[in-house]
């Protein structure tokens, strides 16, 4: 029975991370994008403080040279990522945004090829081409006259870029710090930057419905803090390649939840493009782990939704 616990927890993470996109879309009826991000990560910051204070958490002294990098990671992965994603979902559906965000592995490989001159196989190129075709189909699923949709699409891509660089920059830091320690510092740093939306949050809290407030708090507790901790546990119990493959179900789950919870059905061309782009991302990610396995290289993989 114990062997099924990681699989159950992986499925749970897929659901709560998928629900984040739907929760953002719903909460934007009562919150501005910046205030939504601030309330969400104020909640996540409190949760991470509770986890961080546990005696079992290994605390390693942070070097002075690492502090600016950690702060920059928090700014990218928490502040810029969430504000850009929230703004994008004003005009882009939850499922479309999740399909775009799922392209992070593809962008990581692209940057590795360009800047690190990493070798790539034919399968990797096939996967990247499929991802770009899928993204193009998502882009043309709305009329060109719908300017706000394409701005939203651009912001979703910007959020994906921010998260991609966040994942790349954190790798050397995770060799020095424990995952919970790094995640705590990143969330606290990002939340500090998000305080620029404090006045906006105070205003929104005066007019927001209780359901929207509780939804944002949910986003901070579950997809933000608890989701990360469960994800760390899952990675410790099963191969990272299998765990990441499971995450490609998240956009499909987002589409289902969006339909059930907020009556949101994206254009059929966007769904087709999303499935093609997911296939491409899966192929790229599979080849990435094959290469790393062949080279006996172990990687640290974390993500905060």
Image (cartoon, rainbow, N blue to C red):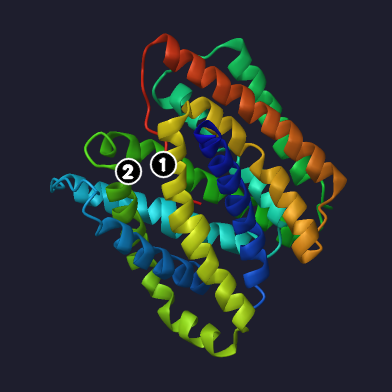
**Residue 179, label in figure:** 2
Q: Residue at x 42, y 18 (%)?
A: 117
Image-based side of 277 in relation to 221, left or right: right
Q: Counting other residues with Cα less than 10 Å from the Cα at mark 2, is it few (<14), some (14-19), or many (20 or more)?
A: many
At x 35%, y 54%, the residue is: 74
Q: Position of residue 153 (x, y in %)?
A: 67, 52
Label 1 vs 2, first from the N-terminus = 2
Secondary structure beneath label 2? helix
Q: Quadrant of the N terminus?
A: top right
Q: Marks 1/2: CA distance?
A: 8 Å
Q: Which residue is pictured at 13% across the width and 48% down the height?
A: 64
| Vertical side of 227 occupied by 135: above or below | above
> Is residue 154 placed above or below 109 in the rendered structure?
below
Say which of 218 and 140 sits in front: 218
Would residue 239 be found to the left or right of residue 183 on screen? right
**Image disc number at residue 232:** 1
Question: Is there any visible trace of residue 106 in the rendered image?
Answer: no
Outermost residue toward the right in this view:
268
Viewer-proximal residue, 60 or 127?
Answer: 60
Asked where in the image residue 136 lies, by quadrant, the reply is: top right
Percent x, y of residue 267: 84, 50
- Asked if the residue at tag 2 contacts the one at tag 1, i.e. Cβ–Cβ closer than 8 Å, the answer is yes
């Amino acid at each position: 029975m114990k062997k099924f616990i990681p699989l159950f927890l992986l499925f749970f993470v897929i659901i709560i991370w998928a629900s984040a996109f739907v929760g953002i879309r719903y909460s934007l009826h009562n919150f501005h994008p910046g205030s939504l991000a601030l309330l969400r990560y104020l909640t996540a910051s409190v949760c991470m403080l509770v986890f961080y204070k546990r005696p079992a958490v290994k605390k390693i002294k942070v070097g002075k040279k690492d502090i600016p990098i950690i702060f920059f990671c928090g700014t990218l992965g928490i502040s810029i990522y969430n504000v850009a994603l929230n703004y994008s979902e004003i005009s882009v559906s939850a499922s479309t945004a999740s399909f775009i965000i799922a392209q992070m592995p593809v962008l990581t490989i692209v940057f590795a090829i360009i800047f690190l001159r990493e070798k790539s196989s034919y399968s990797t190129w096939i996967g990247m081409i499929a991802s770009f075709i899928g993204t193009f189909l998502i882009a043309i699923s709305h009329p060109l006259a719908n300017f706000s949709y394409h701005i939203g699409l651009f912001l979703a891509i910007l959020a994906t870029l921010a998260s991609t660089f966040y994942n790349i920059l954190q790798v050397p830091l995770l060799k020095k710090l424990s995952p919970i320690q790094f995640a705590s510092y990143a969330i606290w740093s990002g939340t500090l930057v998000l305080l620029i939306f404090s006045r906006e949050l105070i205003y929104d809290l005066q007019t927001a419905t209780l359901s929207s407030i509780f939804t944002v708090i949910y986003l901070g507790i579950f997809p933000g803090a608890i989701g990360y901790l469960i994800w760390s546990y899952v990675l410790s119990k099963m191969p990272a390649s299998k765990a990441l493959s499971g995450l490609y179900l998240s956009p499909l789950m987002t589409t289902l939840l969006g339909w059930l919870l907020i009556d949101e059905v994206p254009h059929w061309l966007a769904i087709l493009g999303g499935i093609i782009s997911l296939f491409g991302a899966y192929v790229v990610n599979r080849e990435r782990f094959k290469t790393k396995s062949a080279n006996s290289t172990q990687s640290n993989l974390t993500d905060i939704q």
